[in-house]
Amino acid sequence: MSKFYAVARGWQTGIYKTWSECQKHVFQFPHASFKKFESEEEAKEFIEKNGVTSIPKLKQVKRVAKTKTKLNLPVCEPDKINEFGLIMKDGVPVVYTDGACSNNGSFGSKAGIGVYWGDDHKWNISAPITGRATNNVAEYTAIIFAMEKAISEGLSSLLIRTDSRLIISSMNLWIRKWKQNDWKTYEGNDVKNRDLLERIDELKKQIHVLFEKVHGHSGDYCNDQADKLAKEGAKLYVG
């Protein structure tokens, strides 16, 4: 089935047949507005309701020429970016989280978190963690920071994207069983990082949150940005 990508606000407004065409005209455009539709009529209506005059063609050419050698287009595909600069998917704000730890499990390990809401977004976080420096602690801590920020800003729902299998399995499969089993694993061992898991579980009472797996190191632009933020944060870790 054909898809129609409508760009109402971008470097060049219009309707495009592929996401790769669309993203060229919205990447790094302030408060870009774009959306995917099943029909061309819906796409036209979206542009008529939300569109503004695009940047003159001459200015657009200058921008492309200036960044041609280093342009790194995202491959994450949101429905649109709202007026607050948030990535949206099916009407739900999207955030990308990651945890990083150098020398994980060894002496001298340093861990940090990355929370990515969008390019240069004021909610982005790059910071070291406190306490135990492990990759898993960093992953859970990044989730906590993202949820706390979303709640403090009044969001009612949130889609968290992460390349961590641990996060996806913990949140979507294991946590309910762990709670029912008094925070014991299937083998009867204590669940690791219980304090962080309990904090996440408490925050879930204040916001509707979904967790979605992203393939790590697959060229997903947004996930790569979260990874960069986490690695920069880890450099600041003080044990």
Image: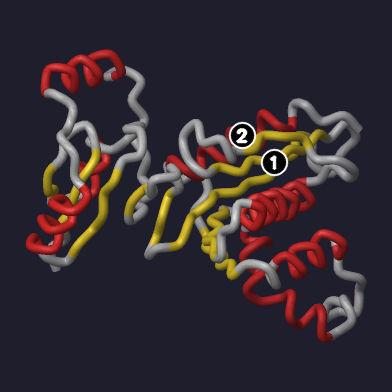
| Residue at the image point whose x is 72% and y is 65% from the top | 203
Q: Secondary structure at mark 2?
A: helix
Give the residue number, with chain letter if any, for mark 1. Answer: 113
Indicate whether 111 appears above or below 1: above
Instruction: Rate crowding at label 1 as few (under 14), some (14 to 19) or many (20 or more) other CA atoms within 10 Å.
Output: many
Where residue 122 appears, as percent x and y from the top left, is 56, 35
Outermost residue to the bottom: 180
Q: Is residue 31 left or right of residue 145?
A: left
| Residue at the image point whose x is 31% and y is 40% from the top | 32
Q: In whole angstroms, how far apart are the C-alphas of marks 2 and 1? A: 7 Å
| Residue at the image point whose x is 53% and y is 51% from the top | 95
Q: Is residue 132 left or right of residue 33?
A: right
| Residue at the image point whose x is 36% and y is 53% from the top | 78
Indicate whether 5 appears above or below 235: below
The residue lying toward the viewer, choosing from 117 and 113, is 117
Where residue 150 appears, as percent x and y from the top left, is 61, 54
Q: Secondary structure at mark 1?
A: strand
The residue lying toward the viewer, choosing from 49 and 92, is 49
The residue lying toward the viewer, choosing from 119 and 137, is 119
Which amino acid type corresponds to the residue marked 2 in the rendered image?
Answer: Leu
Q: Are marks 2 and 1 in contact (CB under 8 Å)?
A: yes
User: Which labelled disc corresponds to residue 229?
Assistant: 2
